[in-house]
Amino acid sequence: MIIANWKCNGSKEMMFSWFENYSKEIDCGDVPPTVGVAPPLIYFGYFNDENTSLRFVEWGVQDVDHLDESRTGAISVDMLIDMACDFSIIGHSERRQIFNENNNLIRKKLKSLNKRIMTILCIGETKEENDKGITKDVLKEQLEIVNGLELDTEFTVAYEPVWAIGSGLTPEPKDINEIHKYIKDVVQSNSENNLSPKVLYGGSVTDKNAESFFKEEFVDGALVGGASLDGTIFAKIVNIFNRTK
Ligand code: PGA
């Protein structure tokens, strides 16, 4: 599964060239991997309605609110369902850091999405935490979000070390693999239905390094930020995934 997270980037014009470039480059064969794009919310409807001819692409959002009432500026899960949204990312480190979201709130979001819209929960340690050697402790605490929940079988985790996002730095593939195994084990023992989730890697994934991650056993795909803004490069990453997995 390869997911594009466009964050707060893009324009109508950029999207036209993205579609064109992606369509030219993509070479999925008969069994395409799951590919999802999360554009800025304001463009979401445009994608979903007008461009359904873009084969094998699912459309999602980068965040959602957990309630539907008087909450100016918010978008609810019911609205996402109304718009045939395929997935929602929650808990991205930028939401945690810039918008002060904590585990408590992110758990509420997960509960309102669970079994209704496929959820991708982002977790990851900071540079300081990594240096201190407490990565697994940090991830375990972030994964408390799933405690006691009967998770949708499509529930997915994205492991995104904060220090790898947009920095050009990444952990070693074998270290990512070990962490992914750990995440699967923690979710399996903490969730009510003992679900072993898919785990995507995110943080400076490009068409140059993607293969080294996809070769690892427990890497089930990628969440791609910067490199997903170019349709050609994103399609290359999808093609590499298709060849490697
Ligand atoms: P990046 O972002 O690929 O630009 O590092 C990944 C993300 O934040 O999801």
Image (cartoon, grey):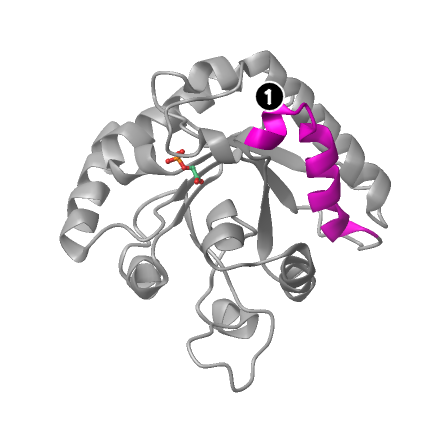
| Crowd class of label 1 (few under 14; some 14 to 19; many from 20; radius 10 Å) | many
Residue 136 lies in quadrant: top right
Let me know if residue 138 is in the magenta part. yes
- Residue 210's place in the image compared with 220, above or below, is above
Residue 42 lies in quadrant: bottom left
Decide which of 199, 34 is in the foreground and name it.
199
Q: Which residues are magenta?
A: 128-147
Q: Residue at x 47, y 21 (%)?
A: 170
* View quadrant of ligand 1: top left
Amino acid at pointer 1: Ile
- Residue 144's place in the image compared with 163, above or below, is below
- Residue 125's place in the image compared with 75, above or below, is above
Q: Position of residue 237 (x, y in %)?
A: 37, 26
Q: Residue at x 51, y 48 (%)?
A: 92
**Residue highlighted by disc 1:** 176
Q: Position of residue 142 (x, y in %)?
A: 69, 45
Q: Position of residue 66 (x, y in %)?
A: 60, 70
Q: Residue furthest bottom?
A: 70
Main secondary-structure element of the magenta-colored stretch: helix
